[in-house]
Image (tube, helix red, strand yellow):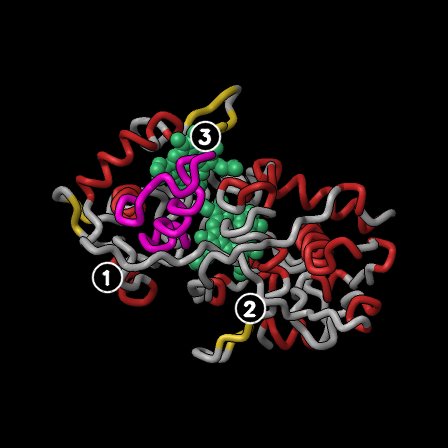
Amino acid sequence: MNRISAIMLGLSLAGATAAQAVDTAKLAIQEELPVGKVAGDYPPAPGWDKLPEGEFGEKVIRGYNYFINTQALAPEFVGNGLNCVNCHMDAGKKENAAPLWAAYMSYPAFRAKNNKINTYEERIQGCFLFSMNGTPPGHLDPALVDLSAYAYWLAQGTLTGEAFDPADMVIPSDEDLVKGGKRDDFPFMPAYLEAGGSKEPALPGRGYPVIDEPAQAPDIARGKQVYEQECSVCHGANGEGQKVNDRYVFPPLWGPDTYNWGAGMQRVNTAAYFIHQNMPLGQPGKLTEQQAWDVAMYLDTHERPQDPRNQGSLEETVEQFHGGHSQYGKEVNGSVLGTASYPNHPNRPQ
Ligand code: HEC
Ligand code: HEC
């Protein structure tokens, strides 16, 4: 039986180890988000005064804490120095930095291409495997339940806005919670729906906004110049980031301790979208689109941890998983990217 039918039948896989429960082949097929252009108005996220009482509120707080300090889940699940919040900024609330309130209501996502469904939980597992260079927690692992609870609360509060009353929130079962909110039978705030509210908002601000293809092909040498002028002061001369008391205050962009060759951010287009909208920190819009493409090319032509889907053949991995915007398998300065990669989940407990 595959995982989806197991979920449909409501069978619990809790108790299985992470390695057994996670079908990494399925995570491998995650694709680029369908994102729109920047819109004008974004709904404000709920404040802590709107936290639901009791056990569910505790899940939300724990989920928030894991999101901003994902290192708390190392070494079991996390294999690099990053935290979710490094790419999903402002605790996952910031529009155009893949905010959770938009994400939660977009799953389960059906992909016609190969007839598969990605639940919210599976999407997060993908970020553990690739962006966190780790091992994903298994189905219904408390960490995934808590992270889902945080996103659900943000989604409800954001969609309903001023009217949000946490006491009206329907508390889903853990099984329902980890699937995501885009289901006809998802128990979403009855009072809000009765008043004509939509569960399928336009979701402005989802993902990282697309910018046009550059006028000139992205160029590593120009990117290096942008990097040295605009980025190295925080991220370090060698993309290694900066630590205080053994914790990163500025996260690494390449090398052994960052996202791996399977992550969304290693695609030059995705990095360019993220950077154009969010970097340099505190100065969004400072870079031209061309500069964002150039510096993204520069970052993503450096070695990083191996693509965990690589079963021994670089060529096959390139062919199966790496489309036009990835530089994995390409030759740069005399060496082929992906041949001197760093290990996956190096700190994994034995
Ligand atoms: C290195 C950057 C990075 C880190 C760290 C990261 N993510 Fe992501 N995440 C992305 C990117 C990029 C995407 C969009 C995927 C794409 O376009 O391929 C994404 C997508 C998502 C989505 C789906 C968004 C949507 O609108 O569909 C969720 C949910 C998510 N990440 C959760 C997490 C969680 C939880 C963590 C921490 C365990 C995490 N991410 C860590 C970069 C990151
Ligand atoms: C003022 C310091 C600062 C500058 C300058 C800066 N960044 Fe960042 N960058 C950060 C911080 C801090 C984060 C994590 C954001 C968070 O956790 O809220 C980050 C996150 C990132 C990430 C996602 C996380 C990761 O490790 O991959 C990328 C990619 C990135 N920056 C690229 C750039 C690029 C490219 C430039 C130059 C155009 C740049 N940054 C300039 C501070 C900076």
What label sits on residue 118 in the rendered view?
Answer: 2
Q: Is residue 229 magenta?
A: no
- Please identify the quarter of the rendering in which residue 321 is found: bottom left
CA separation, marks 2 and 3?
31 Å
Q: Which percent across, then down, holds residue 229?
A: 28, 30
> Which residue is rendered at x = 26% and y = 62% of the image?
324
Amino acid of disc 3: Phe
Q: Which percent across, then down, holds residue 177?
A: 72, 62
CA separation, marks 1 and 2?
27 Å
Amino acid of disc 2: Asn
Magenta segment boundaries in residue numbering = 264-291
Q: Which percent across, then down, holds residue 210?
A: 39, 58
From the image, tell me which residue sits under label 1: 315
Tell us which disc is closer to us: 2 or 3: 3
- Tell whether 269 sits left or right of 188: left
Quadrant position of the N terminus in the picture: bottom right
Mark 2 vs 3: CB contact within 8 A: no
How packed mark 2 is, by other alpha carbons closer than 10 Å (few <14, some 14-19, many 20 or more), is many
How packed mark 1 is, by other alpha carbons closer than 10 Å (few <14, some 14-19, many 20 or more), is few
Position of 124 relative to 54 (above/below): below
Amino acid of disc 1: Glu
- Please identify the quarter of the rendering in which residue 315 is found: bottom left
